[in-house]
Amino acid sequence: MPINTEKSIMASLNQILKDVLLLQDSVTVPNFGTFETTYQSAQLDEKTGIIYPPTKLVSFNAVLTEDKKNILLDYLTKNLGLDQDAAQKLITDFISQTEEKLKEKSNVVIDEVGILYKDDAGIVGLKSIPSNLSIDNYGMEQVEVEAVSGNQRAATSKGKTVTTTKTTKTTTVKTTATAATAKTDAKPKETEKKKDNKLKILLIILPIIALLAVLFFLFKDKLFGQKQTNKPAQIEQAQPSTPTVDVTGPEPEVDVDAADPDGKILSDAGFRHVTPIFLGDEYKKYYLVAGSFTTKANAKKRKNELKAENIDSDILSIGTQHRVIVGQSDSAADIVKQYKAITENHPSLDYWLLKNSR
């Protein structure tokens, strides 16, 4: 497994870290730091009516630098067939290149894990990207349901807790004591006891019904036989379809580096933020994205919406992410030129700038 170039070393370790975190709760890069995961349960967005599947959020601990369990080294030797020296060199080269990029104030993007950066104090941190880094929920997609109403409150994708308030009406029976009934209150007590039992049964049944409803919405695609297909990354034309509005973007952004020549061109044109993601060496450096989707069908619908507005677009499919792009170039000046041409004719178009971190 010859890995010589800087780009291939970064890309290989990026993929390896993602694969290990899919199976483990944490992984330590010796003499660098530890990537730790935190589980986040399924969430419901009350505004859009979309249930988001469980996810893992990754954080970085720069203090834990000793890999006592040898998780990363064992993965490289056992799963990839590298010998100890080759595996250790791959790790060492990855650390060296990462620290060099951070020293230059450049961000390091680890796909589906997060964005490494160094703050003003020189401490390495990680901006987490929500992902499906868990075997239990790998491949799950968001589910669209009807919006809630009344005094129900659901969590948004920001991570709030889903709470639902239910009110059970009870009837109070007033009993007036008279001389004729004053001898005993056995019957009223028995009636109240039966009511309490019914209330207890109701309180047990209601949570079960609510749980079944949530499970149904989470897994209804599988129940009705819908299949998912993972196809190679490609740009392709879409077939006519109906409009859609469930855009997943914009994706995580970082500030544009105005000290960089390309960054100054982007900054002067009005771009203050950019979404950095490693797409691969064969792709362009810059893309203007008008929508990002987890299903290709919804990306095709968005493409048709833009076509109806006389806007040319293509679909950039990489893994499980399908982005609708309205401009692409290896040159910052050229992408700015395309941006100005589009905004002049379509000032209300909503899109963001994606940078291929190659």
Image: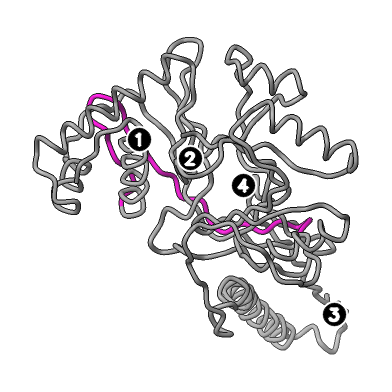
Amino acid identity at mark 2: Phe
Q: Nearer the viewer, residue 255 or 51?
A: 255
| Whether residue 98 is situated above or below residue 236 in the rendered picture | above
Give the residue at mark 1: 10
Give the residue at mark 2: 278
Side (left or right) of 24 relative to 180? left
Give the residue at mark 4: 159
Residue 310 coordinates in the image, percent (x, y) = 86, 55
| Whether residue 229 is situated above or below residue 14 in the rendered picture | below
Residue 59 coordinates in the image, percent (x, y) = 43, 35
Asked if the residue under mark 3 is in contact with the one under mark 1, i.e. CB atoms within 8 Å, the reply is no
Label 3 or label 4, whichever lies nearer to me, is: 4
Per the model, the C-alpha gap separating discs 3 and 4 is: 49 Å
Label 1 neighbour load within 10 Å: few <14, some 14-19, many 20+: many
Question: Which sits earlier in the primary sequence, circle 4 or circle 2?
Answer: 4
Per the model, the C-alpha gap separating discs 1 and 4 is: 31 Å
Question: Which sits earlier in the primary sequence, circle 3 or circle 2?
Answer: 3
Name the chief secondary structure element in magenta.
strand
Side (left or right) of 254 relative to 168? left
Label 4 or label 2, whichever lies nearer to me, is: 2
Q: Secondary structure at mark 2?
A: loop
